[in-house]
Every structure is written in structure tokens, then in C-alpha cells.
Image (tube, grey):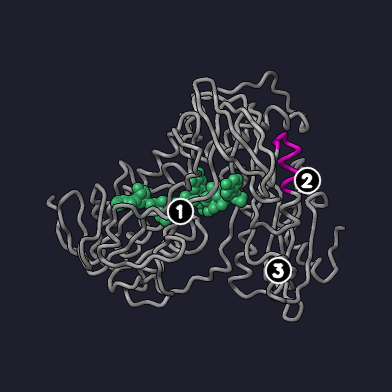
């Protein structure tokens, strides 16, 4: 079929933000095209982010379980080995199924995939590989890329970003991770479970600095107990790669004497930044903010009429579900609806084991805002299901407003924390009080009962501790 050259909406980028925006706009009756330069749809998340990393996390969790945990349950498996090629094969299959799934959804919703790199040539005009298309609405959803570090040159072989770390051909003897954030800890866990010694070099005095401090401390202990070496308050000042490995130079964050550290592989994971190169934003005059993100108003509109932006390339958490919700909301706004995103109710999860999950505010944030709050906590050690699973590390922590009892924050470290946090995200979204959560009947025996007990604990009336 010939490709039309005029659309209601052209979305640039087919990640979770862009492809969801395209689907929702098509559902609402608009004629939609989505430009994607990668050979497959799905963006960072499906190709080199959320999905492949979770496949490897899952596979290596099974290995770890077979090696160290099944015996507790009286399951004897004998010698446990891994087959890295097969593990990577599973990851590839999962990625393939997901990206093809998006392609199927595009066909189902009659969305045109314009293959190639897109640029905005004028308001209402998008060029893809030399051909120009017209659109009433243009959506920038070009995502993000790994932040470089001067003196540490990425070659995706010895010195890798997350993309290279998802593809290593063999388990490194010593993996040094620069940046103790989400990527470093998730992918560090993957390779550590397979036998690598992992050292994490973190600039700040704690891992994943955005976490509630108490949960962060427990997380640090859990990672250390698993054998991860942490070098906090430390910066990397240089890296020399050779055939035999990488020689890193480290220094205290506050300055001082340098030291050397040898690694087989170095994973650079110090954050991500908007990916806007080649889009032509300067030519059409789209404004960026002080951190190089596309500046938008409360309705995702840039300063140029008809041009919008969503996802990792604008302000806010760089998370797939945040991008998706923005994509959907923007399509609805363009169609004249009035959707609303509650940014305070966006959960975030670190998929290590134990998992760490959070929604709403931390104690530190509430203190800084001068809000009076109450805290309820419940350890998994006192939860029957966690005991049955032999997964008793961790706790649920609920923070509620001292006066109104509204749930202000939920913080969980423990088994399946990422799934458990949904209940507290919904509590915040619905404006529930901790008493609402406490009075909701929770099935027994489930891990969710720890959430109910933490809610009861807000008023000092937990039953099982
Ligand atoms: P992206 O997914 O980055 O998609 C942007 C797309 O635009 C890309 O496909 C790119 O090729 C395309 N593009 C860019 N410029 C152009 C152009 N000029 N023309 C055409 N196409 C273009 N988030 C979670 O919520 N949970 C997780 O578990 C999670 N795990 C992650 C693991 C890793 C290793 C990484 C790196 C990220 C992870 N994230 C996770 C973050 C998540 O991937 C991002 O928040 C999400 O992908 C952002 O979606 P997006 O649509 O804004 O951009
Ligand atoms: P991050 O922001 O999570 O962590 C970066 C860490 O590097 C921070 O702790 C920071 O203090 C540290 N750092 C910064 N500069 C440094 C330096 N020069 N030397 C040493 N340490 C330094 O970023 P990360 O891990 O790269 O991930 C990027 C983003 O991708 C995340 O913020 C998240 O939005 C997304 N992501 C989400 C996942 C999830 O939801 N499970 C999984 C993976 C990524």
C-alpha cells in the first residue's frame, strides 16, 4: 500500500511513550504515523532496557535459587550449572516476542510505521529519510541515552553501557560498575549471580540515593551480604582499556589520593540523558530546559504550537510506565479529553533480589517539606507466606499524614516488592487513608498481608508482631 503523506499525528520514537501514544491516538480515531529508526519497535525498554534486563534477572534468579535456596525446601538438585548461550537465547526470544507484539498492535490499529530517523523541518512537517510528511500534531518521544563520563571511553566490549552489559559473551572475573543506581545494581546482580566479583563505585555516600534512607540502608546490607563490594563516596577519574582488561583510577569524591582498580569489564551507569540529536529542534525553535530536556507545559506542549514531548526526553522519572501514561494522556488531550497524571503515584522498582519498591514521598522528603507524618512498619519475618517461601528479609513501610491519615508514601524491600507496591500506588491515587488500607480484607496467607499489617502499625495496632 502507498504511504499517505499527511497525518493527524506523527509520533517520533516508538518506545513505551511513543508507541502507546500512537495506539491511543489511533483508538480515538486519528490517522497516525510513528517514526522509528531502530530495526524494531519498542524503544529502549523492549529492545535494550526493561525487558531484556528482566529476562536475565529472572533467569539468574532461577540459577541462584537452584544453587542456594531449593535445599531449604527439601528439593535436592545436584550439581547446578548454567548455559549462558541458552540464557541469552531466552532473553532474545522474549525481546523478539515483545517487539513483534508492538508491530502487530501497529497493524491492528492501522498505524503507519515510518522507518528511519525523523526530524522536524518546520511546525507541522516531519522528514524521514529525505521524504517530508505533514502532521497536525507532532510528538517528540525520542527517549534517552546513557550519560558519558569524561576519561571513561565506552567501546561496548571492555567498557560497556547497559546495552553491552546485556550481551557479554562470558561471565567477567571482576566487573566494576560505575554508578550505584538502578542499572548498576540490577545488571551487577545478574553477573554476580553467575559468579563475577562485582565492585560498585558510587559518588554519593549511599546506593540508589533517591530511596527512603531506612530502606536504602537495608538494601545496602542486602547487596553487601550477597558479596557485592561497595566503594561509596568515590569517583572514577580515568580508565585505560587493553586486551587484558581495564585499569581504573579512583579518587575520594571529596578529593584526595588516587588508587588503581583492575577490572575485566567496566559497566558505566551514571544516569541517562535526553536523546535529541538530529531532530532539528534548534531549527524550529523548540526550547530545552537547563538540563537539556524538552521543555513542556502541564499538557506536554512545547513552546512551538503543535509540537509536544513525552517520556524520558522531558522532566520526571525516566520510567517506562511514566512514559506510557504520558503517551496515553497526550493522545487523549489532543482528542479534546481531560486526562490527569498523578506524578506522586508513580511507583518505581529496583528488580534485584530482594526487590525494592517505592511510591509517593520518603521520610526525608516529608521532613524537608515540614509535613507531620506517622510511620507504620511490618517485617516480612512476621509474615506467614514469606516464612513459607523462606524469603523473610525486608519490610513494608507506610507513611501517612499525621492529621488526615492520607497515605503519603509506601516503601517496600523484600520478596515481590514490585508487585506489592501497586496496592499503595492505588491507595495514593484514590486518596486512601492508612486506615482504608488496614480495613481492606487481604487474603491469607499472602505477602500482601504485610502491607495491611504495616497500615495497621501506623496506629500502633499491628496484630502479628
Ligand atoms: P525510549 O524507550 O528510549 O524510545 C525512544 C525511541 O525513539 C527509540 O527506539 C529510538 O530509537 C527512537 N528515536 C530516537 N530519536 C529518533 C529519531 N530522530 N527518529 C526516529 N526514532 C528515533 N523502566 C522501567 O519502568 N522499568 C524497568 O525495569 C526499566 N529497566 C530499564 C533497564 C535498562 C537497562 C534501561 C537502559 C532502562 C530501563 N528502564 C526501565 C527505563 C525505560 O527503558 C525508559 O524509561 C523508557 O524506555 C522510556 O520510554 P520513551 O518512549 O520515552 O523512550
Ligand atoms: P541512576 O540515576 O539510577 O543511578 C546513577 C548513579 O550513579 C547514582 O547513584 C549517582 O549518584 C551515581 N553517579 C553519578 N555520577 C557518578 C560518577 N561520576 N561516579 C560514580 N557514581 C556516579 O542511573 P542509571 O542506573 O544509569 O539508570 C538510568 C535510569 O534508567 C534510571 O534513573 C531509571 O530511570 C532507568 N532505569 C529503571 C529501571 C527500573 O525501573 N527498574 C532499571 C534500569 C534503569
Mark 2 highlights which residue?
392
x and y percent of residue 289 in the render? 43, 66
Q: Secondary structure at mark 1?
A: strand
Q: Secondary structure at mark 2?
A: loop
Task: Answer with left or right where residue 37 lies relative to residue 463.
Answer: left
Question: Magenta segment, principal secondary structure?
Answer: helix
Q: Which residues are magenta?
A: 219-229
Numbered disc total = 3
Nearest to N terminus: mark 1 or mark 3: 1
Residue drawn at 76 percent across, 38 percent down: 225
Q: Secondary structure at mark 3?
A: helix
Distance of mark 1 from mark 3, alpha carbons? 37 Å
x and y percent of residue 288 in the render? 39, 65
Q: Nearer the viewer, mark 3 or mark 2?
A: 2
Relative depth, front residue between 86 and 446: 86
Residue drawn at 35 percent across, 43 percent down: 100
Q: Could you classify mark 1 by the number of other residues whose Cα lies within 10 Å: few (under 14), some (14-19), or many (20 or more)?
A: some
Q: Is residue 396 above or below residue 207?
A: below
Residue drawn at 58 percent across, 28 percent down: 247
Asked if the residue at label 1 sits under 8 Å from ligand 2, the reply is: no
Relative depth, front residue between 282 and 199: 282
Dividing the picture into quadrants, the one containing residue 110 is bottom left
Mark 1 highlights which residue?
273
Q: Could you tell me if the residues under marks 1 and 3 are in contact, i.e. CB atoms within 8 Å? A: no
x and y percent of residue 454 in the render? 77, 62
Dot label at residue 306: none
Nearest to N terminus: mark 3 or mark 2: 2
Mark 3 highlights which residue?
437
Distance of mark 3 from mark 2, alpha carbons? 22 Å
Amino acid at each position: 500500500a502507498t504511504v499517505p503523506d499527511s497525518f493527524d499525528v506523527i509520533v517520533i520514537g516508538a518506545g513505551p511513550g511513543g508507541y502507546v501514544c500512537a495506539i491511543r491516538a489511533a483508538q480515538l480515531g486519528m490517522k497516525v504515523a510513528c517514526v522509528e529508526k531502530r530495526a524494531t519497535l519498542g524503544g529502549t525498554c523492549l529492545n535494550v532496557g526493561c525487558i531484556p534486563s528482566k529476562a536475565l534477572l529472572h533467569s539468574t534468579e532461577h540459577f541462584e535459587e537452584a544453587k542456594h535456596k531449593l535445599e531449604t525446601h527439601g528439593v535436592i538438585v545436584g550439581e547446578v550449572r548454567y548455559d549462558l548461550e541458552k540464557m541469552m537465547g531466552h532473553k532474545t526470544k522474549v525481546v523478539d516476542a515483545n517487539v513483534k507484539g508492538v508491530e502487530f498492535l501497529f497493524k491492528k490499529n492501522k498505524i503507519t510505521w515510518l522507518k528511519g530517523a525523523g526530524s522536524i523541518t518546520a511546525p507541522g512537517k516531519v522528514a524521514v529519510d529525505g521524504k517530508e510528511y505533514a502532521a497536525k500534531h507532532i510528538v517528540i518521544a525520542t527517549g534517552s541515552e546513557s550519560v558519558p563520563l569524561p576519561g571513561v571511553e565506552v567501546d561496548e566490549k571492555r567498557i560497556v553501557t547497559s546495552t553491552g552489559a546485556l550481551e557479554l559473551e562470558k561471565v567477567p572475573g571482576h566487573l566494576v560498575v560505575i554508578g550505584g543506581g538502578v542499572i548498576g545494581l540490577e545488571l551487577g546482580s545478574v553477573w554476580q549471580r553467575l559468579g563475577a566479583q562485582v565492585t560498585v563505585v558510587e559518588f554519593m555516600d549511599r546506593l540508589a540515593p533517591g530511596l527512603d534512607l531506612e530502606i536504602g540502608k537495608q538494601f545496602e546490607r542486602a547487596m553487601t551480604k550477597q558479596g557485592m563490594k561497595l566503594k561509596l563516596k568515590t569517583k572514577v577519574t580515568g580508565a585505560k582499556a587493553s586486551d587484558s582488561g581495564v585499569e581504573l583510577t579512583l579518587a575520594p569524591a571529596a578529593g584526595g589520593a588516587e588508587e588503581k582498580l583492575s577490572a575485566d569489564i567496566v559497566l558505566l551507569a551514571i544516569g541517562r540523558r535526553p536523546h535529541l540529536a538530529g531532530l532539528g529542534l534548534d531549527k524550529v525553535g523548540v526550547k530545552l530546559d537547563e538540563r537539556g530536556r524538552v521543555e513542556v507545559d502541564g499538557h506536554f506542549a512545547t513552546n512551538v504550537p503543535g509540537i509536544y514531548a513525552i517520556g524520558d526526553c522531558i522532566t520526571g522519572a525516566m520510567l517506562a510506565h511514566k512514559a506510557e501514561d504520558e503517551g496515553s494522556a497526550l493522545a487523549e488531550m489532543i482528542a479534546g479529553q481531560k486526562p490527569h497524571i498523578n506524578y506522586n503515584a508513580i511507583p518505581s522498582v529496583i528488580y534485584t533480589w530482594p526487590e525494592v519498591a517505592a511510591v509517593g514521598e520518603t521520610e526525608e522528603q516529608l521532613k524537608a517539606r515540614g509535613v507531620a507524618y506517622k510511620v507504620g512498619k511490618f517485617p516480612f519475618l512476621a509474615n506467614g507466606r514469606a516464612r513459607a517461601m523462606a524469603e523473610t528479609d525486608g519490610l513494608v513501610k507506610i507513611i501517612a499524614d499525621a492529621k488526615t491519615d492520607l497515605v503519603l508514601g509506601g516503601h517496600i524491600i523484600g520478596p515481590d516488592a514490585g508487585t506489592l507496591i501497586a496496592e499503595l500506588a492505588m491507595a495514593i491515587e484514590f486518596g486512601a487513608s492508612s486506615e482504608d488500607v488496614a480495613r481492606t480484607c487481604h487474603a491469607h496467607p499472602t505477602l500482601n498481608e504485610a502491607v495491611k499489617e504495616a497500615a495497621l502499625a501506623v496506629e500502633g495496632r499491628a496484630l502479628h508482631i
